[in-house]
Structure formats: C-alpha cells, structure tokens
Image: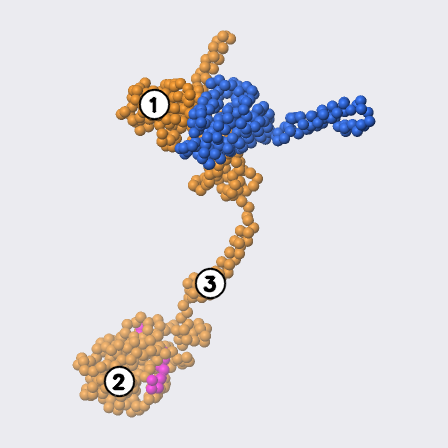
Amino acid sequence: EKKMTNDHLKKLLVYCMLCCTQKIIVQGAQTFQTKVALLRHVEPNNPKCFAEGIRDLTCFWEEDEERAGSAKQYSFIYTYQNENSSECNVTALPAAGGRILYFCRLSQTQLFVPLDIQVFRDGLLIHNRRLHIELFFLLDPPVNLTVKRTEKQGQLKASWMPPPLKYLDDSMMYEVSYVIAGTQMGQVEEVRASSEVILLGLQPGAKYSVRIRVKLDGVSYNGYWSAWTDPVLMATLPGDLDPLIVSLTLIISLILTLLSLTVLLSHRRFLLNKIWPVIPNPESKFQGLFTVYGGDFEEWLGYSAGGLCLRPAYFYSEELPAPLEVLSEVSLDLPSSPLPPKAKQAPGEDEKLKRIDSLMERWRETPHEHWLMDQLRVLHQLPGPQCSQLESQDAYVTLNAQNHSGEEPLDDILEETLPLQALFASGRTCSESHSDLGSLQQSSGSGRLSTQSSFEYPNHTWPPKGPGYTYMAVADSGVSMDYSPMSSSRIDYMGKGVIYTNEYRNEIPAHRQPIPFAF
Amino acid sequence: MGNRRAKGRNGEDPVRDYVDSDMEAPRLLTLLLMLLEWTRPGRASPLRPICDLRVLKHFIEEAKDAEAAMLTCKEGCGLPEPVTVPQTKVDFNVWERKNAPEQAKEVQSGLWLLSQAVGSLRGSVTDATLHSHIDNSLRNIFSIGQVLRSLNFQVFLRAPCQEYPPPGVGVSGAETWRVSSASELLQVHVNFLRGKVHLLLSNAAVCQQGGS
C-alpha cells in the first residue's frame, strides 16, 4: 500500500510539474509574442535583438512566405570582439500576415563588449549588425503594482516590484501613467532607481487608472520600454470645501439673486399679465351696474325683480332685424299719408290703432321739438294693457326720407333735417316675442333715440303706404341699434336718391325712469 | 592629502636638562625618533564610503563625451604606438565566480592600464578640445581610485603616470589586449567603466550594509 501511495504521489507530482511547465511555457510564449510585436514597431534594423536578462539574447527577423525557406537554410553567426565566431541554431515560427518568424536565442552572453551578428540564407549574407548586448534590454513589466491613498488630498501612492534582475536595480527607470478612469486626462511621471512614487496634484474624489512600465536608464545599461502593466484603479480622497471657493460661490449667488429680483421687479406687471392675466371686467360696458346697483342687473335694467314677463332687451340681442317704418314730422305738408303699416295685430288692438291715428293728427297740428315728450305724456296717460310696463312698450321709429310729393330729390333730405318721430304702437301681448321699448329718452335736437329694446316687426311684408317711404330694418342688440335700409315701397325711389342712414347708439341714461306706454 | 600624524608615540615633552652629558645621546636619539614619527607616512583616517553611484555615472557620461569627440577627429588624434588595455567583457557566470577582492584587483589593474594608455594619448593629441577631454578622463580615473579606496578596496594608484604597475597586475592576454587607435582606446575606457567598475562599486560590501 505504501508503494502504491508513493507511486500515486510521484504521478501526481509529475502531473503537477507538467502542468506548471506547460503553464510557464504558455506564458513564456505569450510574453515572447508580446515582445516580438513590440519590437516590430520600434526597431528598424534586422535582426531585431533583445535581452530579457543579463545572460541571454534573442534575435529574430521575419520573411515573407514567398521568399521564406526552412530554418535550416538560415545561419546565425555571432562574434565577440577579439574572439572566435560562434553559430546559433535558427528556429522558425508562423507570424501574422502570412509571414515567417525566424529567431535565435543565446543562453550565455558577454556584456560590455561589441558583438557582431551575421545572418546567412543559403550562404548569402542577408543581415549584418554590431551591437552591445547591455544596451538592448527588453524587460518584463513590473509586478505587484499597488496604489494606495495617502492621508493628504489629491495624492496617491504607487508601489511595485521591480523585475528581479541582479546588478540592474539601480539602473532601472520607470514611467508611471495615471489618468482619470474613462478619460484621457492624465500625466506621465518618470521615476528613477526607486520602486514607489507619490502622485501629487490629483483631483479630489476622482478615480484614477495607474499603470507602469520599466526601462534601463541608459548610463551603463539601456534598452526598450517594457509593456505596460495592467491598470490599477484607485479613487482619491474627496475634497473638502475650500473656504475661498465657498465664499466666492455665495457672493456670486447673492449677486445673481439680486439681479434676478431687480429684473423681475422692473417687469412685474408684464410678468403678472402673462402668468396671471386679469379677468376681463365688463363693468365699463355697464356703467353703474356695480357702483350704483350693486350688480343687480334687473335693477340696472329698470325691471322689477318679480316680473314674470321679464324679457330684458339683451336677451333678444340675436333677434333678426325686422323692417321698421319711421314716420317723420317734416312739415305740415304731411300728406295724409297713410298710417304706418298695420302690424300684424292681434285681435283686440283696433283700439290702439285708433289712438295712433289720433296721435298723427296731433303731430300734424303741433310740430315742435318737444312733440315727443308731449306724446309720451299722452301715451302715459292712456290705459295700457295689463301687461307690465316692460312688455307694453313697443316703439316704432320711421324715418320719412322725402316730401312724399315725389318731386323733391331725396338727396336733399338729410336725416338731421328730419325730425324724428316715434310712434308708439300698441302694446303687444305678453306672449308675443317681440322687442319692447323699455323707455324712450328724449334727446332734444340730437336726433338720438335711446332705446333699450330691439325693434321687431313681425310682419316683414310691409305694404307700401305711399311714395317716399324709406324703410329701415333696425336690429337692436341691446347695446346699439343698427339701422339698415330695407327695400322701399317704390323701387325707383331707391334708385333716385341717397338714403342717409345714421347709426343710432343706445344710451342708457343714468337715471332712467321707465315711461310706461300704453295705447 | 598629506600625511599626518594621528598620534605621537608619547606625549612627553623634550628633555631640557643639558647639564648631564651622559644623557645627551639618548635624548638626541629620542628626539630624532620623535621627529621621524611625525614625518613617517602614516595611514590616513578612513574615508567615508562613497556609495552614491551618481559619481560614477557622471564619469561614464564624460567618458562617452570624450569617445564621441574622438570620433569626429581626423588628424592629430592618433596613438603614437599600440597600447595595452584591459578586457571589458563581463560574463556573469565567470564574474560571479570571483570574490570581491579578485574583482577589485581586476578593476584596479584595468584602471592602471587605462591611465597609462590615456596618458600616452594625451601627449600625442594636438586638438585642444580633445586635450581637455583626455585630461578630464585621466582625472576621472584617479577619482574612481579614490572611490574604491573609500569602499575599503586596496588601491595602488597613488599618482598619475605611475611608472611601476601595481602588484598583481597580470600581463596575460586573457585580461588585456592591445589597441592601436584612439577611438578604440576611448571605447574601451567607456566599456570598462560601464561594466566592471560599475559592477564592483554597485556591489561593494560596505554599501550593501546600509552605508551611503
């Protein structure tokens, strides 16, 4: 059993050695390939030689596959000064790009003496070179690179193990590269004859990537820069707030705040209008509605609050214009023009028409400026219908645009010269939807007719009552009255003269007393 | 560095009694011995070890400058006759088999040979710039001797152009060879300093013990 155990142990040991050897060989091969690739770019001469230690030398060259031959075709002859020549066995390896790599490795060398190298291919010299081996070192990268934080801000301490080469410790120089991780912002620092360095001037609270490479210093020994080590990441200590920076920041913030406030205050109205626009207040259009009547619209309109037949004129602002006949008191020559066309009267209104006729007769008799007020008084005295004052107040305004004789040109007739007569028709029934005249304000000589209602003549087929009547459609929106000339009873009349129209604007009297009209 | 007496044999004052003539001879003899003791070339105080290799590196750089200057010289810069120079090659397998004294002896012999060879070149060079380089090289060789002495290596170089070789200097071809051109001489000078001298100084036992 012991013998079997020993055998097993031996096999295991051999297996481990083989594995380690294989691992070393693989690593060595990778290292060799790395160095070959590195030298390929930096060394222009052939053969390219490098020493990894104080006792070896490796030289290689490459040939195109077309011209390349077997390794036996090549001879590598080397001669030290004042000594006989020696030959090195050449080995071939496949290289990148379809090329062949030939190399020779010397395991025992002499330094500080010139060495002549000659390469022959089939007896022909293809490469010739003289060099000092101690000037062609290509070392392995340093190992165990460690980066630590120091107690001070903006500092890192890097330490490493130099290549384990005797006699070369004091001749090595290192290049430490430190960049902020993820960026290209960094520096390179050179270190001589030391295996640690403190990196200064780093950003606080930043993560740095540190790597290092080695080379001989060039005094007694020289060579190429080694490959970089694998980078090591380390963050610096976070920085404390610099009192100067804090104070400057506060001052700048204060200045910016004051400037902003100044700008805001200088444009506060504009900004308020933009951010919080003022709600339009129609109070200006309803003079006295809020100041006098406290917002009571009915009061302002002059209607009682309890009226069932409350039909303010503004509710009918969208009513269609209706033909309207306005009779004017021009002169005594008023023909016995027919009465204004009869509205479509409901039964029971003949009495009212009779009143109108009586009024007409009076107008003919008393043409004066204040005839309107007289008529108003008359009408006020007349019994009206049972409806409220609001609904019983209908008004017809007719403009007589000519002398009715048919001879005078119409263009001479200006509205201003025509006294305006208002005929107050009989009141309608409450159920009829028509416009009512709330009140009639006399405006002496001004020609203005103040109404609060829209005129509506249900009967649009206004029969012509004689020559010279001009009919105007009045649309009262409750704010203003629009008069538009309608077709006259006589077409030729329309073509002869000019019809003068004025826009009548309703004016709400400040203190208005509803004047009841009744027929 | 002049000789100086570190310590007298005795501290007694000279005899002042002239009356006794029988004691006059011994007194005179004593005086003579004291005087000789004072004038005897005694050992100097031990030097502080010079372990900083920047000194040697400076000498190496100046030797390189001299070699580079010699390469540009075309006339008036030849050796009058071939000179013997030390071997500069270093086979570490062989070097490490030698002990420190043997290494020091080899370095000292080589320095002496170089001093002789560069000295003979100094007499044949007419170019002023080269002349200064050669003088500098000679001074550096002897300065290296001082460094070796500070490291407790036995040094036999006392004065420039010493005629007799230091003891133990081999004249066999294994350790020396002959050059006939000035550029070869100065190249040997550089290689010797970079190689054997540097190896000896960088591995001095005194410096390895922590002294600087």
Residue lying furthest right in this view?
Answer: B19
State the residue position of label 3.
Answer: A263
Chain B, colour shown = blue
Q: What segment is highlighted magenta in the picture?
A: A433-446
Q: Secondary structure at mark 2?
A: loop
Give the residue at x 24% y 89%.
Answer: A334
Residue A62: x and y in percent read: 33, 26
In front: mark 1 or mark 2?
A: 1
Q: Secondary structure at mark 1?
A: strand
Same-chain status of marks 1 and 2 = yes
Residue A138 vs residue A299, the one in the foreground:
A138
Give whichever of discs 3 and 1 has the lower sequence position: 1
Q: On screen, A193 above or below A111?
A: below
Q: Is residue A450 visible?
A: yes
Quick one: which chain is orange?
A
Give the residue at x 56% y 28%.
Answer: B159
Residue lying furthest left in this view?
Answer: A492
Answer whether residue A402 is magenta in the image: no
State which chain disc 1 sits on: A
The disc placed on residue A119 is 1
Residue A319 vs residue A388, the one in the foreground:
A319
Q: Amino acid at mark 2?
A: Leu
State the residue position of label 2.
Answer: A414
